[in-house]
Image (cartoon, rainbow, N blue to C red):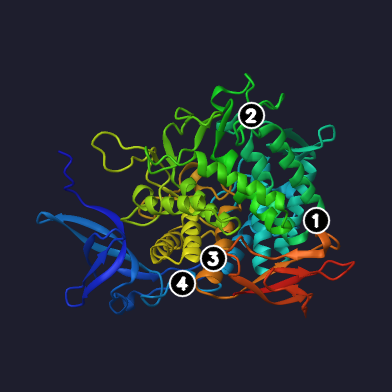
Amino acid sequence: MNNIDFTFSDTIAGYVTTFDSDKGIFGLKTSDGREYQIKLTVTTYAELTRNLGEPYQDCTGQIPSMLVPGRYMYAYGTYYPEQSIYKFEAKRIIFNGRTEKEYRFEKQNWWINQIRELGEFYLRAQFEDKPIDYRNYRTTLAITGEKKGDHRQETDTISRLVYGFATAYMMTGEERFLEAAEKGTEYLRDHMRFYDPDENLIYWYHGIDVSGNRETKVFASEFGDDYMGIPAYEQIYALAGPTQTYRVTGDPRILDDAQKTIDLFDKYFLDKEKGGYFSHLDPITLDPRSSSLPERNRGKKNWNSVGDHAPAYLINLYLATGEPKYADFLEYTFDTIAKYFPDYENSPFVQEKFFEDWSKDQTWGWQQNRAVVGHNLKISWNLMRMQSLKPKDTYVNLAERIAEVMPAAGSDLQRGGWYDVVERTLGEGEEHYRFVWHDRKAWWQQEQAILAYLILTGCLQKEEYHRLARESAAFYNAFFLDHDDGAVYFNVLANGIPYLMGTERLKGSHSMSGYHSFELCYLAAVYTNLLITKQPMDFYFNPIPGGFKDNILRVSPDILPPGSIRIASCTINGEHYSDFDAAGLTVKLPESKERLKVKVHIVPA
């Protein structure tokens, strides 16, 4: 019963062990040590992993010379059940570099070129090579970038796209990206922001419906998980794009918006008795315990309301200002996570949903007692950022605990890549954590894995973390880049083939905009270049006159280990400029009535 006595096709990811050129058979060992014998056929073809914007790079003729021991690669082919074993014949091979030691995505400009292509894709898709006007923005984009659906403009998706454009400018200095970031920030302020003068607080609408010259505000969320509530994460992500733009420009209005939104969190979302932040407010009373809220979101806390402050806006706000109060907020956030989220006596996955007294909520909606793999990795990644700001054993210990247990519990050790949502515990007789809906892999969860293992490598210098970082980045760059239409796929099947059904075929949706893919390019470049391969990077800023406090521009690209990087040189408007603190990573801006284009050259210390 249930015998697999039929052919099927799949992917194997692993390291070459042997190659018999006479028989056309090579050995491949998976990440967890299982060995396969793979046969080449007369129709087997091979290619190099290529970046967005690069042409197809065939290396079929070089297969024999490239199958050398130690090379990490992918083989897609067919299993044949013959003679009581499975014979595997490869049809497609993907190599990650020209030599067994080369990983193309570790080159200094790989992620910089990728973010440029992403920025160009979203400029074309949203503004169609016309002047940048966010009234033409649409939340839903087809796989080709074509606009689809109604005229709903969601605040968070605009903000996430603004984040992407601001970040693309920081990495490339291309003016169109800055223009798109600033116009998007202005659009958010003019159309999606509500200032309450009595409370001196700022709220952000869920979105607006645009019809001709009319727009209708939508205050409470209309997304299914959050229906008729004000979710904390929507207020959080409304700040993502403007805050990143503030890092570039120093516009004090953005800083004021961010602070007044934080005041909203502290007045209404913060649980002043038991700690943490509530996940939802009633849109009328602003009461997290209101009986008018759906029961599943009444008096609840979750990863998004507690932890998402840090990566979405708070770390960037601290980097831009250096203000101790934002460092304290970060410390409070990570102390809360370290105290309440680990649940290792019951599961290798953190607990993500809570009642207000921090008891486990394992009946909520679709989550139940289930784990989002990417959230675990996201915690590890951000704990290591915090470790460089305020070191604590609790931070690094939890970050490493997650990093050590996640490969076996949440990754695909056969094909590469990271899964989506799985059951947190094993059932009777089970040896594998069950997939909740499918074994597909989402682009954003690959990002969390790549960044977690890159920063762990850069900070702790452990080879095992470097191996996992490379394997994670290899899967993403081999299978998620859309070389036909641009940008990245939402989901791929377990074997790496793009999944193009329903909302998962879209390049823009409630769930996908210009955030995770751009953030990945930015921080993968920072961690790889500045911490691991020790290569320099340039960063660009365009401060407005008198924008930054005391005319101090802070240019640290992320929270990195103290003393790990320094400013090597600086130019302003193309001219050499020397008034900077190399170790402190600040530039003292000159008095000016005009905007300044600042370029800093940062090197490993």
Label 2 SS: loop
Q: Say whether marks 2 and 1 touch (CB < 8 Å).
A: no
Give the image location of residue 322, x and y in percent.
71, 57
In the picture, measured across the screen, residue 192 lies left or right of residue 11, that is right
> Between 584 and 458, which is closer to the camera in this rendering?
584
| Point 29% across, 74% down: residue | 67
Label 2 vs 4, first from the N-terminus = 4
Q: Say whether marks 4 and 3 touch (CB < 8 Å).
A: no
As measured in the structure, the alpha-carbon distance from the residue carrying label 2 to the one carrying label 1 is 31 Å
What type is the residue that disc 3 sits on? Tyr
Give the image location of residue 259, x and y in percent.
75, 45
Question: What numbered label is drawn on residue 104?
Answer: 4
**Mark 3 or 1, closer to the camera:** 3
**Mark 2 or 3, closer to the camera:** 3
What type is the residue that disc 1 sits on? Asp
Label 4 SS: helix
> Between 390 and 356, which is closer to the camera in this rendering?
390
| Point 53% across, 65% down: residue | 52
| Point 22% across, 60% down: residue | 88
Quadrant (top left/top right/bottom left/bottom right) for the N terminus: top left
Query: What residue occupies the far front of the structure in this picture?
Result: 393
As measured in the structure, the alpha-carbon distance from the residue carrying label 4 to the one carrying label 1 is 37 Å
